[in-house]
Image (cartoon, helix red, strand yellow):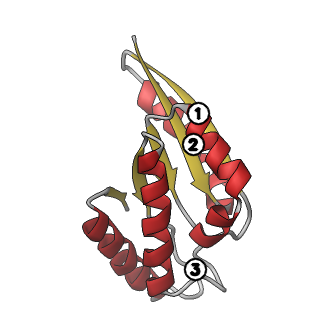
């Protein structure tokens, strides 16, 4: 049986929706795989915030032996501009790679009251994926 270790780095979208457990259940359904999931998610945080949490983030990455690290940041006001998201996303992706894991970029969703933000977010995260060569999950 194949075993996968996955770390979710995220925000309230990650933990309120219990994304790690949903992912685990879907990945294991009908497959010969065992998935272990871990989550570092805090309400309303960005890539920049996760980067500032040196001890927590680096310890998890260095000692977790993760196969994949899913990256999601806050999307609601005040969310970072596209340039900041791309800059910080690149730093986070590089850190994940240096620790031997594969990063996966996860697109957050726009607030219901501001649906036009979704196109901006899609373009931002698509650009980040293209510039880093990493996979992107809309």
Instruction: Give the mark nearer the N terminus: 3 vs 2.
Output: 2
Q: Which mark is residue 61?
A: 2
**Which element carries disc 2, helix, strand or loop?**
helix
Q: Which mark is residue 127?
A: none
Query: For residue 74, what is the image quadrant?
Result: bottom right
* Circle 1 crowding by C-alpha within 10 Å: few under 14, some 14–19, many from 20: some
Q: Which mark is residue 112?
A: 3
| Residue in the picture at 43% in, 41% down | 101
Q: Is residue 12 visible?
A: yes
Q: Is 48 positioned to the left or the right of 55 in the image?
A: left
Q: Is residue 21 visible?
A: no
How far is mark 3 from mark 1, CA to CA?
36 Å
* Circle 2 crowding by C-alpha within 10 Å: few under 14, some 14–19, many from 20: some
How far is mark 3 from mark 2, CA to CA?
34 Å
Residue placed under numbered mark 1 in the picture:
64
Q: Dividing the image into 4 quarters, which one contains the N terminus?
A: top left
Instruction: Give the mark nearer the N terminus: 3 vs 1.
Output: 1
Q: Dividing the image into 4 quarters, which one contains the C terminus?
A: bottom left
């Amino acid at each position: 049986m194949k075993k996968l270790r996955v770390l979710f780095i995220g925000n309230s979208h990650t933990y309120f929706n219990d994304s790690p457990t949903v992912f685990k259940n879907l990945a294991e359904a009908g497959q010969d795989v065992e998935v272990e999931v871990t989550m570092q998610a805090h309400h309303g945080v960005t890539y920049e915030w996760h980067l500032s949490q040196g001890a927590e983030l680096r310890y998890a990455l260095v000692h977790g032996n993760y196969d994949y690290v899913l990256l999601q940041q806050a999307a609601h006001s005040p969310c970072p501009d596209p340039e900041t998201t791309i800059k910080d996303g690149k730093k986070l992706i590089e850190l994940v790679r240096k620790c031997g894991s594969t990063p996966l970029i996860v697109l957050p969703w726009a607030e219901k009251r501001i649906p036009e933000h979704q196109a901006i977010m899609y373009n931002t995260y698509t650009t980040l994926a293209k510039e880093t060569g990493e996979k992107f999950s809309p």
